[in-house]
Image (cartoon, rainbow, N blue to C red):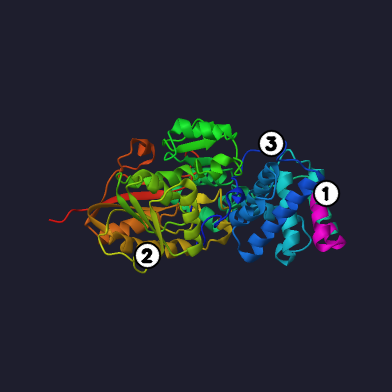
Amino acid sequence: MKRRGPRRAPGRGGAQAPQARAPTRSGQSGALAAAGGAAGLAARRAACDILVAVETRRAFADVLLGRRLGALAPVDRRLVTRLVLGTLAWRGRLDYELAHICALPLDRLDPTLLAVLRLGLFQMRQLSRVPAHAAVDTAVTLARGARGRGAAGLVNAVLRRAARGALAMPERARDEGAYLSVACSHPRWLVGRFIEWFGVARAEALMAANNEAAPNVVRLNLARGTREEVIARMAADGVEVVPGGCLPETAILAATPDFDAASYREGWFHPQSEASQMVARMLSPAPGATVIDCAAAPGGKATHLAELVGPHGRIVAFDLNLRGLCAARAVAQTLGHRNLDFARADVAAAAPVRPEAAQFVLLDAPCTGTGTLREHPEIRWRLDPDDFRRMALVQRRMLESAATLVRPGGVIVYAVCSLAHDEGPGALRDFLQAHPEFALERPPVAELAPWLASDGTLATSPERGGLDGFYAARMRRCPKG
């Protein structure tokens, strides 16, 4: 997966060791929701530290999770991940309630105390297996350890008041936007954009889906063997695959896998969302082809393309982010792909290869990431209304540059993991108006048909089949003469 956000950011998880990768939010279990004991307190302390860093340093939660989880037992990894991503997702609703019951304005609270309050209230409202008294007690212990007795008393008073009952939501009939903003925990201005783009019913369904756990999806490394052989190797490590997934290389797991498993470390599979896998299939390069990936970090799609072209093909992978390129190289090495060349380059400025160099080009462009709010809930609180327009301009510059690399008769795929109309469809429309030598075409992959619009573009969304929100378009350059 690729980091998405309103500003260029490092690849998801960076060049982390395999065991340090953050799992997605899986369903609650008795173990996940365990409330007491030193291990439970340590997990909550780790979650609190991450929440503070996300708030004060604008760090990314998945990167911080990746750095902390490797030292924890699998059950604690699931708990910390659920606490962090869940608290970030529900921050708007939590703050609405805390603002009514806390004696001080929230912006005047110490960041650690605010994180402790959010964490405690999240457990009380969203984790049904955690008793209210346990959520209060652990929050008080965290506050006392971090800021002393006075802070512990404040946290105790606020959360015990919250334990008496949840605050009523704003009246929907009076102000539907305000209601949806609190009930679905999204910034009000973003609620307005979703309604503008999709209508009230779909916007509400989308925001509800954004607060759910993403499925645990991996891409099978079919360079290692058949689908059946790869799944059997994973099963030997206790990594269970359940039915689902539209592509032969897509596998949905029964639970978050143990990333210490030998089958992961040996490169039999790679964590990558189903919609992200569809992007490489939109390009569908021929075996033996040379492909230019213009924004390759952190390597999911580049290595997918390397598998599709086979050992006699070549992937030339560019990215401006050096750390992301290092991560991509590490992924390629783990998966056993030797047919990739990596180079640091800013394709938005100029591609470091001659024009019309490739038959196949992929531009998976940086974007606001509004299609990935399940995995990156902090993005919703960082976006500004102007980010959609600004990122669309970046994408348009990159698309102009990437298109020069396509030889006549060749194909380019432009993709973003954003739901914003300004970005995917808007940037594409402007490009096609300026470049009549390119034309949309449907990808030659039958499995993608349910997700394609009449013009052949791909559009997925969390509330429609549980996929991340991606927009992708396949274009062919007209042959000369």
Amino acid beneath label 2: Val
Magenta span of residues: 137-152
Per the image, the residue denoted by label 1 is: 137
Amino acid beneath label 1: Asp
Per the image, the residue denoted by label 3 is: 29
Question: Residue at point 44% right, 33% down?
Answer: 227
Residue 342 belongs to the span the image colors magenta: no
Name the spot of residue 177 as percent of width and height, x first. Answer: 56, 52
Q: Is there a contact, CB below 8 Å, between mark 1 and mark 3?
A: no
Q: Main secondary structure of the magenta part?
A: helix
Name the spot of residue 154 as percent of width and height, x first. Answer: 82, 58
Per the image, the residue denoted by label 2 is: 347
> Closer to the camera, 179 or 132?
132
Judged from the image, the secondary structure of the residue bearing numbered disc 1 is: helix
Q: Nearer the viewer, mark 1 or mark 3?
A: 3
Q: CA distance from mark 1 to mark 2?
A: 52 Å
